[in-house]
Image (cartoon, helix red, strand yellow):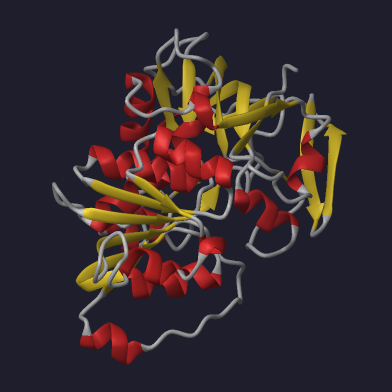
Amino acid sequence: MKAMRLEATGQLFNREVEKPKPGPEDLLVRVEACGVCGTDRHLFHGEFPCTPPVTLGHEFSGIVEGIGAAVSGFAIGDRITGDPNIACGRCSHCVNGRVNLCRNLRAIGIHRDGGFADYVVVPHKQAFLLPGDLDPMHGAFCEPLACCLHGIDLAEIKTGASVVVLGGGVIGLLTVQLARLAGATTVILVTRQATRRRLAEELGATASVDPGAGDVLAQIAGDNGLVPGGVDVVLECAGVGETVIQATKLVRSGGTAVILGVMPQGEKITIEPFDLLFREVKLVTSFLNPFTHRRAADLIASGKIEVAKLISRKVSLDEAPSVVSNPPQPGEVKVLVVPGL
């Protein structure tokens, strides 16, 4: 079969490899779609730890074509989404229910072969059924949505709350929708790209702000801003130092800032602890998707989260290395790699 392999930092190639065989507790899944994530680009550039050589791709869904001898609850032909994050279940974090912090965490598409391939092997405990009549492309959004759900859980958004989402990529646009579902009545998306601002408002944002049009703090939290004094919750979804700092300043006294965006490993920013202390700002980080993948799959299946508008383009495996090794195109939200193309 064909697979896109990260062989070393900056070395990404399509290779002909052996079709994998499922172990006793595994499923063999024919990949229908696998999303390109910002983390894939970090992996390519050596900015996020992984273990090459490895087939990338952790946002995948597909059809079960092989079932291990010890597996029950799945049938040939089932459509599934895979949670890529495999916890050991034994370390102190796992025992205490913090599986996303597992000391021995291994991720499909990062530490073991992933979904940028014709087939992927998925432990059955990491697989979640999707409706057979679901659009095959939509299943690839379960993994990023699961990560957003964890951030929303940590934000503890109350009915009637005001929320700012920093970053208009797929994480930001999914988070806008989740914030509205959580009961926020004011949801403001901040991004430089006009197409993403318009899309955010189509998806439920009550307003959008262009950082290029002036100081973001003044536009939102200033005396004449959209929410004078700051908002209840800020969700940083861009993974950029500037927006992390903005998150701490846009939140009102007593509010919560949640960091979902992934910055390159080793990058540093400067914040003012006295300011956070004096305003009693809760600064929270959100990592991965502990126990949220089933909820994400159910939300995708329900149609309550709009994902079709987030698909910018579909590419073949042949095109995938160029997509991952280059920055996103202007206005691009989610590129899906479709092995069948």
> Please, is residue 147 above or below residue 297 in the view?
below
Which quadrant is the C terminus positioned in?
top right
User: What is the x, y in percent for residue 300?
Assistant: 39, 26
Instruction: Determine the image quadrant of residue 322.
Output: top right
Q: In x, y percent, where is residue 104?
A: 48, 59
In the rendered image, which quarter is residue 245 located in? Answer: bottom left
Q: Residue furthest left?
A: 159
Q: Nearer the viewer, residue 1 or 12?
A: 12
Judge from the rendering whether residue 212 lies leftward or rightward of residue 317; answer left or right.
left
For the point 45% across and 13% down, the residue is 134
Could you tell whether 251 is left or right of 142 in the image?
Answer: left
Q: Is residue 319 visible?
A: yes
Residue 65 pos. (x, y %): 59, 14
Q: Nearer the viewer, residue 339 or 105?
A: 339
Q: At 82% from the left edge and 31% from the top edge, which residue is drawn? A: 17
Q: Residue at x 81, y 32 (%)?
A: 319
Residue 97 showing in the rendered view: no
Residue 170 horizontal side relative to residue 46, left or right: left
Q: Quadrant of the N terminus?
A: top right
